[in-house]
Amino acid sequence: MAKLKMKKIELIAMLTDSKKIIELLQRRGVVEISQNTDEELENTNVTAVVGEFEKFRNTAAQALEIIDTYAPEKAGLADLFNGKTEVEKHEFGKEAMKMEKIMAAANEIIKNQRTINDASSAISQLEIKCDMLDRWLPLDVPLNFKGTSSTSAYIGTLPYQITAEELEEQLPENCSAEVVSGSKEQTNLFILCSKQSYDEAGDILRKLTFVSLSEKDPKKPSELYDSYKQNIKSHEDEMEKARENIEKLAENRKQLQFVVDYLQMRKEKYDALSGLGFTETTFILTGYIPEKYSEQLKKEIEDKYTASITFTDPDEDDDVPVLLENSKFSSPVEGITKMYAMPAKGDVDPTPVMSFFYYLFFGMMLSDAGYGLLMIIGTTLALKKFKLETSMKKTLTMFRNCGISTVFWGALFGSWFGDIVQVVARQFFGKEIGSIAIWFEPLTDPVKLLLVSFGLGILHLFLGVAVAFKMTWDTGKKLDAIFDALPIYLIVLGVAPIGAGMFISVPSVLKTTGIYMLIAGVAILVLTAGRTSKSVFGKFFGGLYALYNTATGYLGDILSYSRLLALGLATGSIASVINLIGTMPENKIIKLILLIIVFIVGHTANLAINLLGAYVHTDRLQFVELFSKFYTGGGREFAPLTVNTKYIKFKEENQND
């Protein structure tokens, strides 16, 4: 299987059963509901209801974020892989009855967070005031002091350094100045003048760019400072109390998670209801369903409710969604296909086509059996121990299969954590161990690996051409299928022995055969590639243009597979350098300790870097080299009404896995 065959579904049922049927469809997750377009049927407006669900859900989600900030849940490695919490349907109903209480807790959590935010803001402002007051603490009068019955005062700042004596020389008689505090950038002053000299002193100070304080509080700076500090302490106590309240309310974490998912389900259910068509007593649902689930769903609904369900084949112009289903071997790499694009209506699913080469190329790029064993052990333990979601399970299975391929290639090339076997034997036991490669060592014979890479690349490209041939053949254009594929096979196979002869000795009979195949392929391509043109010149030059495109295109494609050599050599050579660094000391005890440390750190880093490189470049070989030969993409992924939750799932959902 690849693309599941889709059916159009039309369901007619009693209006009173609409919500129950939608809930059942949501749990089954096999029907994509289409928007009602029949003008004779009524639609229902659910905007207000959906808005309420969204509002409450956001409140619960916000409360969860606050809890995670102040009372984070202790999560081990196992929790990262464990899937959603499974709940029975009856347990789900019981929890839903407690929603009002949980929402009250959510609001209380948000209220406490608001208290913390307000207190934090107030503390920031008070700390700024304390910083400003700090320079005025030596002053023994209030900052709003204006003088006595016979004197007037100025309290303020000059934006430069000055002494009291220097300032008094510029002020009129009966004025005295006191420097409260100062720095190179400013001087804080208290100036006392007689009533008669006050105005004159003010004119002089303005010219000196004196800035008066605007404090209105009648307290002394030290009193104000103590008052601000007390307020800060009060706000800090308020914040601490609010934090403690949040930590106590963290016991509602699981219930809040349930509410988030419950409201999300309710919202999506009502969104689905908005797509239905209604009469006074019935509702009509239309959409798409995979054919393999159709009869089972029909029986379940018609047995439980007064309903009628019919299935029909989609029309040619219908926008039919795509759902992929592949074998256990191929399905783990479905995510790679989806990353590129879903198959269009006329496409085949490329997943089973590429899966074998995907694993093969990944292992060849990583090409260290030790690293492959680590991948197999790690992914197998995770798959067996944890309850994984489907997507995570497929991803880990893909890397397990890639690990098996990596062990295969690593054993062929004799790389087990680089050359660690030879290094340990030489450095600690005084024995020389030769190559342990089953086939050959790439570091000593890179040309052979390059030719193997090109050979596998040609097979990979031929697979793409073969798929394109079958797709064209199945449409009835059999001659087109032959003329599009045969010349490419002949040209590439003809050039292959000639190109290989540049690196190794190739029997002359193969070269001669290659030349004949090349000539035949060129002739067929030139004569047939322009067959759609009406004029003779159009046919001829169309053929020449196709020859140019084929030559340059396939040459570039084949050269792209040299990355198999490059990444394979990189992994092995870096691993060997890591082992060399670990054995540099002369003392065997120090050497052993250093080797253990360097081995763990170095090979972990090497595995991580080259794992990423193998993943990226293997994807590229599928997307650019293989898919370009037959795959268009652009299809729409099947989007059924389902339980789209973050934390929980129904146990019965597993029946469609």
Image (tube, rainbow, N blue to C red):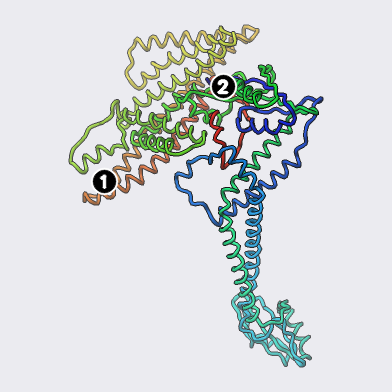
Q: Is residue 496 left or right of residue 287?
A: left
Quadrant hosting residue 155 = bottom right
Identify which amino acid the numbered label 2 is placed on: Lys
Pick whichever, 390 or 284, lies toward us: 284
Q: Residue at position x 42%, y 11% from top?
A: 515
Quadrant hosting residue 379 = top left
Residue under pointer 1: 583
At label 1, counting other C-alpha atoms closer than 10 Å, the crowd grade (few under 14, some 14-19, many 20 or more) is many
**Is any atom of residue 160 visible in this view?**
no
Q: Residue at position x 39%, y 9% from top?
A: 513
Q: Residue at position x 38%, y 43% from top?
A: 604
**Is any atom of residue 422 visible in this view?**
yes
Residue under pointer 2: 3
In front of the other: label 1 or label 2?
A: 2
Q: Position of residue 398 (x, y in %)?
A: 45, 31
Pick whichever, 226 or 183, lies toward us: 226
